[in-house]
Image (cartoon, rainbow, N blue to C red):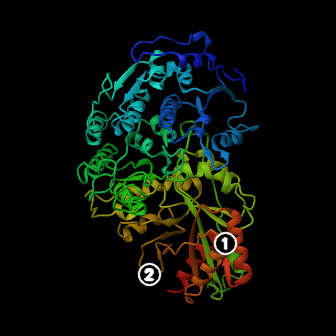
Amino acid sequence: MKAGIKIMTTLLLAVLALSLSACKPEYTIPSSELPTLHEGEVLWLDLTKWNSASISDTTEVKKLWDAIHISSTLQGNVNREKPVLYLDYVNAEKTNTDEYWWDIFSKGGEWLSGKEKVVVYDPVKACEILRDRIKGLVVYDPKVPATSCVASMVAGVEDLVAVRYDATPGSFYTRLIAHGFEPKVWLVNQDGSSKFTSKTDTYRWAIDNYLKPGKCNTEYMGYYIDQCWMKNPGASTKNHHQLSNHDFFVSQRAFFFDLSPWDDEAATDDPDGEVGGDYRTLKEILLEAYHHNGDGDKFCHIGGFPAWAYKYSNHSKVGGCHTPVETEWKFAEIIGEYNAFKDADAIAYGAMANASFWQHFPLQEKYTQKWVTREALKEKGYLNQDGTVNMSKRFVLLYVGDYDAASWIYQTTTSIFDDPMRGTVPMMWSVSPILCRRAPMAMHYMWTHATENDYFAAADNGAGYLNPGSLEEPRRISNLPSGVAQWAAHCKPWYEKWGITVTGFIIDGNARKMSDEGLKAYATFSPNGIVPQLVDGQARLVDGMPVLKSGGSSGEDRTEDAVRNIQSATKAHTDFPFYWFRAVLKTPTWYAGVKEGLDKQSPEIVWTTGPEFFELLKCYLETSK
């Protein structure tokens, strides 16, 4: 089929009108009426109608959930070896994000140039077209929420499509059954009664039958909200069910879970459960992965983030005892103890689609960046001719973050990186290099479209988000041996691939501050600088690497407020002229406005590039001993 051809849905509408049995097919679209996918064609599944589904209508919410879960588990399986199925679903503000990325890389000479779309609008139709690439269904229990996460895990391991049990005529489940898709794994009894009684019971089965026997790929896990999302779909953005994120982890045959990190309360989605029950199950899962991963030689890549607007926090009516930030930090602390990190698909921009498709994007072998010379710093008057720092200046660096999640760069490139003011002001974009596993095209686009004023550092806390202090002995939660050397070995090749030599920010969170062991490990892959929260003194050199204690936030919405904040901070120290500020999801227009205000009102303040700032800091530390 050629681009733009729409697959007729008349027969599907007729099917919807039929009363279908949950056990016996009554109607199947003849195979002669299904398109065949040829070389050079991509099946384009248009799911955009679900963006207008009413979240106040329980029936609509269930249909939305089912449509996206079926589609993402199908996609993860069929895209495992090569890109076959593309979903059109995720919107970022006013932009259709999935179409945005397709359009960029389907232009002349780009990776998708010449690819033809075969367009369908129905997940069941997509399953029909790709029938020979999947082995059947895994059916889960609408009354036991945890079974939806386990279903995604089973789907990837067994090459199945996940579907929620719903015997209602016309449901996605009954339609798949009617079209001849056979359930291979039941997470609910075939009469609809529950097979499992609780979250703990469900994960115990998954651990014993899949995780312990080594059926899962323990280098990857998906930490995404289970079907409890349907109880309060309006707690965050409509697509924060994050089902569209599952496809990549399905393609990797990952283990999926949704568990509370707290040991001092029952999980908010299971208030009658055992205090700390989720926490103990989480530790068991992570320990099992650790051992399967060569006792931590390979780090476990966990996609997702605590769903604090729905669970496990004291936000709104959630019912927990801890703040959302405390929950974020607790989860990071725990996973780091087991040599795991999170690819932090956090609320606001947490939805992503098509990572299983884009994982096949052909990256360059290496991406390079320029560093500044000391001669150039002397020419600008930042260094004196004797190599000492010009102390009449106040050197400011703004951390451009927080790009520690593939979903965040997937959604925000169009509104932030593509801002027309980019290039007019120096910006140190901080991106975790490990995100190229799920969003390689986004990182390639950023690096290859950078101006001389765009520099890239690593986001928190390197090649993945964990608390590096949790890697050091004694590890208070896991009691495992040190993971510091393993972390350095993990990070180094990712930094080298992307030409990164600075870690723009390190969230130490609940973990202890890094000792010299941890700092020396960072010097092996981030030699030009790191910015931890916890460090002795304001700044020092460790094996030639500048270590700077992080400053405050300058992320006020009003640029004039940010200007006042920076001006106030730079007056606090006269003997240490370096000031680091963190801002999150701000546009180049915002940064340009802040710089303009500082240039007009405070000429002694120098807005530096990342290389300038850290090279000047190194000079200062070398000459002020």
Coordinates of residue 531 in the picture (x, y in percent):
50, 70
Corner quadrant of residue 553: bottom right
Q: Amino acid at mark 2?
A: Gly
| Residue 497 in view here | yes
Q: Amino acid at mark 1?
A: Thr
| Residue 224 in view here | no
Residue that mark 2 sits on: 537
Q: Residue furthest left?
A: 274
**Could you tell me how far apart the alpha carbons at marks 2 and 1 are, in whole angstroms?**
30 Å
Label 1 neighbour load within 10 Å: few <14, some 14-19, many 20+:
many
Residue that mark 1 sits on: 559
Coordinates of residue 322 in the picture (x, y in percent):
36, 62
Of residues 566 and 148, which is closer to you in this image? 148
Residue at 54% in and 53% down: 348
Corner quadrant of residue 576: bottom right
Please name which of the two marks, 2 or 1, marks the residue nearer to the observer. Answer: 1
Secondary structure under badge 1? helix
Residue at 31% in and 34% down: 210
Secondary structure under badge 2? loop
Q: Is residue 389 left or right of residue 255?
A: right
Tell me the quadrant of the picture where the N terminus can be found.
top right
